Amino acid sequence: MAASLLSACNQNQPSTGAATDTPTSGAISVSVDETFAPIIKSEVDTFQKLYQNAKVTAYYKPEQEAVQDLLDDKVRVAVLSRELNGAEKAAFDRMKLVPRATRIATDGLAIIVHPSNPDSLLSVPQLRDIFTGKTQQWSQVSGKKNLAAINVVFDANRSSTTRYIQDSVTRGAALTPRAFAAKSNSALLDYVASHPNAIGVVGANWISDRDDAAVQKFLKSVRVVGVSTKTGAPNSDDYVQPYQAYLALKTYPLTRSVYVISREARTGLGTGFTSFVAGNQGQLIILKSGLLPAIGQMRVVNTNKL
């Protein structure tokens, strides 16, 4: 459907009536959860190269600010890691609007530490203790005493990663007093790279596209933790990282869906951009980024058996 919608629209055809944009021309603003900035920048760049009469301006910000922009009609489209909640849907009901949520990918949250940190394999129960402050020293994790107290760093206040950790890892418990926000994902990565006692949480697309020079730089300066759902001392094979194969196999425990949510009541540029991201070309960009596309198939090869 996405491909047929775009192919049926002539980007050079002028709009008529009150509308000033079409699915492939005009201008639109989009609010994006900053966690997905690398992916959406690629989507926007490619879309605008294909449809040169289209101008998509993306604003990258914490999740709740992106949702509020959608509610306040500052943007017609938002990219989020969740669907709208009951209160948000009720607000749209009062406006007599029915927002549409289109699932575009599965994301994994990456746990990162300093390269010198020996504790690069952690279970979900261990992470819960770290994020709630029950475990405050790295020596409590493995018994090794070469690191100081644990500093937990998130990307921003009211971010989707902070919400996810509280909802799915700490199960509603308050975060450790040693947790703070670095104000952006790149600042978070820089902080962990320069503080041996830090542990941080980022979206997988910040560390997955190995063809990206920025990702190569980050991977040289931080270590991606392997995570297991099992308690005690599981086998090292039970620990997996948030890479595509493990997202496809559903063995990585810290995952969430990514949605494009539109309040557009007609077939305008917001609809066209959403269709592009959810269509074949947009999904190939997501595949290259290291996340799991919502459509298409992946072939997972076990090289140990070759």
Image: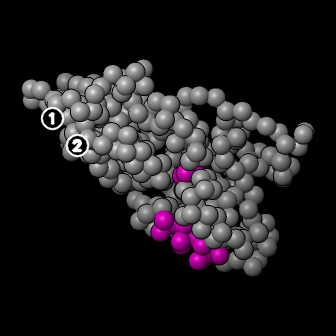
Furthest residue toward right: 305
Give neighbour class at mark 1: few <14, some 14-19, many 20+ (Cα, 10 Å): few
| Label drawn at residue 27 | 2
- Assess whether residue 202 is covered by the magenta stretch: yes
Q: Is residue 286 left or right of residue 67?
A: right
Residue bearing mark 1? 20
Amino acid type at mark 2: Ala
Q: Is residue 58 left or right of residue 19?
A: right
Q: Is residue 4 left or right of residue 153?
A: left
Furthest residue toward left: 17
Q: CA distance from mark 2 to mark 1?
A: 8 Å
Give neighbour class at mark 2: few <14, some 14-19, many 20+ (Cα, 10 Å): some
- Assess whether residue 203 is covered by the magenta stretch: yes
Say which label, 2 or 1, has the lower sequence index. Answer: 1
For residue 206, which quarter of the picture?
bottom right
Q: Is residue 4 above or below residue 292?
A: above
| Label drawn at residue 29 | none
Identified at 59% across, 68% down, the residue is 217
Identified at 20% across, 34% down, the residue is 21
Residue 214 spot, x, y in % from top left: 54, 64
Front-lying residue, 275 or 223 = 275
Q: Is residue 286 above or below residue 221?
A: above
Residue 27 spot, x, y in % from top left: 22, 43
The answer to whether mark 2 and mark 1 are in CB contact below 8 A is: yes
For residue 82, which quarter of the picture?
top left
Q: Which residues are magenta?
A: 186-205
Residue 42 in sight here: yes
Identified at 16% across, 29% down, the residue is 15
